[in-house]
Image (spheres, rainbow, N blue to C red):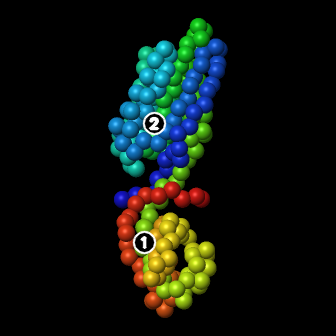
Amino acid sequence: MMDEYLTLLKAGSDEYVVQKSRFLCDAAPAATEEEALLFLRDKKQRYRDATHHCYAYVIGENAGIIRYSDDGEPGGTAGMPMMEVIRARQVVNCCVVITRYFGGILLGAGGLVRAYSHSCALALDRAGVARMCLSRRMMVSVPYPLWDKVSYLLGQLPVRAEETVFGQNVDLVLLMKEKDAEAVLARLTQETSARAEALLMDQCFAPWQE
């Protein structure tokens, strides 16, 4: 199982105009092929009067599903150049759709490759990139006399507190990278003399800033 992968942070859009042809650039995260196809269908319906709807998507942390289409453009001038941009950025679980409104001036094969490559890059730039890391979500229960100490400690550790509930004890939901988990839990145990109780809730991929 992979420990991390890159994907898109959010949906993003831009526009590129060359020789009177408009290229509407759209990108979005897509965890499944169904999500990618729904995103493509939405763009086709929204811009149903457009000349072409070229696309490229990569699904799976290991890029198990790769699809792209020139949608009527000369072979190899749209879908493949878009896919090369996605591969260069090393992002997966994403879909890019470039919608073209033909402006009446032929761009030639080289011009089309440049236009679709540039449009794809614009869409990815707008969407942004997130690093998804294998993570643990832990429930940690802290006695009140230790709360100030633990609260300060959490500010020094590579964790995110997703929820804090003040009940009989202070119950925290903490998210931490899998690679940091053992060290974090050992530090919590040490600093609280094993009085903080930790329970694994789940393991998941989560976005982390560099």
Q: Nearer the viewer, mark 2 or mark 1?
A: 1
Q: Which element type, helix, strand or loop, lies under badge 1?
A: strand
Seen in the picture, residue 146 relative to 104 is either above or below; the reply is below
Q: Nearest the camera: 194 or 119? A: 194
Q: Which residue is most to the bottom?
A: 193
Could you say which quadrant of the image residue 120 lies in? top right
The disc, 2 or 1, on the residue closer to the chain's N-terminal end is 2
Callout 2 amino acid: Cys
63 over 209 or under it: above or below: above
- 75, 168: nearer the viewer: 168
**How many marks on residues?**
2
- Residue 112, horizontal then vertical, whole percent: 55, 20
Residue 88, given in percent of the width and then of the height, sits at 53, 41
Q: Label 2 neighbourhood size at 10 Å, few (<14), some (14-19), many (20+)? A: many
**Residue found 61% across the figure and 27% down from its top:** 15
Task: Give the residue displayed 60% in from the left and 19% down from the top.
Answer: 22
Q: Residues within 10 Å of mark 1 (few under 14, many from 20)?
A: many
Disc 1 residue type? Met
Disc 1: which residue: 138
Residue 95 marker: 2
Q: Is residue 110 above or below residue 157?
A: above
- As helix, strand or loop, the secondary structure at mark 2 comes to strand
